[in-house]
Image: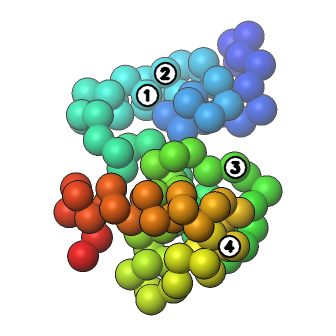
Amino acid sequence: MTSCIAERHGTAWMYRRWGCRCPDAVAARRAHRNAGRTVSTDIDPVAVQRAIRGDLNQPLTLAERAAAVAQMTAAGCTSQLIADRLGIDQRTVVRHRARLRKIGALR
Ligand SMILES: [Zn+2]
């Protein structure tokens, strides 16, 4: 072990979310960066699924929130339901949807 004081270790996600600086995490983070900076690289699908089910114990990043809005919208959820489920304002949902449509992530 290193002197890493993060709560969770070993992946690019832990690097970003928890500040892990273990060699594995640093390498994973570098691989992610080299793969290109896209929105999806910063999304933890498990956290997104949890949020969609109404478990908000793990706060979502902006990208994850957008992913959750996209998935719930695709599933036919209303903006009010999405707002309630994700614990955000309905206007935020509308904003996310507008942006997602703009980048072609949502029809
Ligand atoms: Zn670590």
Nearer-the-camera pick, 40 or 96: 96
Q: Secondary structure at mark 3?
A: loop
Q: Disc 2 marks which amino acid?
A: Val
Nearer-the-camera pick, 18 or 79: 79
Mark in the foreground, 4 or 3? 4
Give the residue at x 36% y 50%.
40
Mark in the foreground, 4 or 1? 4
The disc label shown at residue 85, or none: 4
Reading the chain from its start, which is encountered first: label 4 or label 1?
A: 1
Q: Which residue in the rendered view is the most extreme toward the top?
A: 3
Q: Disc 3 marks which amino acid?
A: Pro
Reading the chain from its start, which is encountered first: label 2 or label 3?
A: 2
Give the residue at x 52% y 84%.
78
Q: CA gap, disc 3 to disc 1?
A: 20 Å
Q: CA gap, disc 2 to disc 3?
A: 23 Å
Q: Which residue is mark 1?
A: 29
Residue 86 visible in the shown view: yes
The quadrant of the rendering that contains the C terminus is bottom left
Residue 4: x and y, percent?
Answer: 71, 16
The disc label shown at residue 59, or none: 3
Q: Disc 1 marks which amino acid?
A: Arg
Ligand 1 within 8 Å of the CB at mark 4: no
Q: Which residue is mark 2?
A: 26
Reading the chain from its start, which is encountered first: label 4 or label 3?
A: 3
Q: With 101 as the anchor, is 49 left or right in this view?
A: right
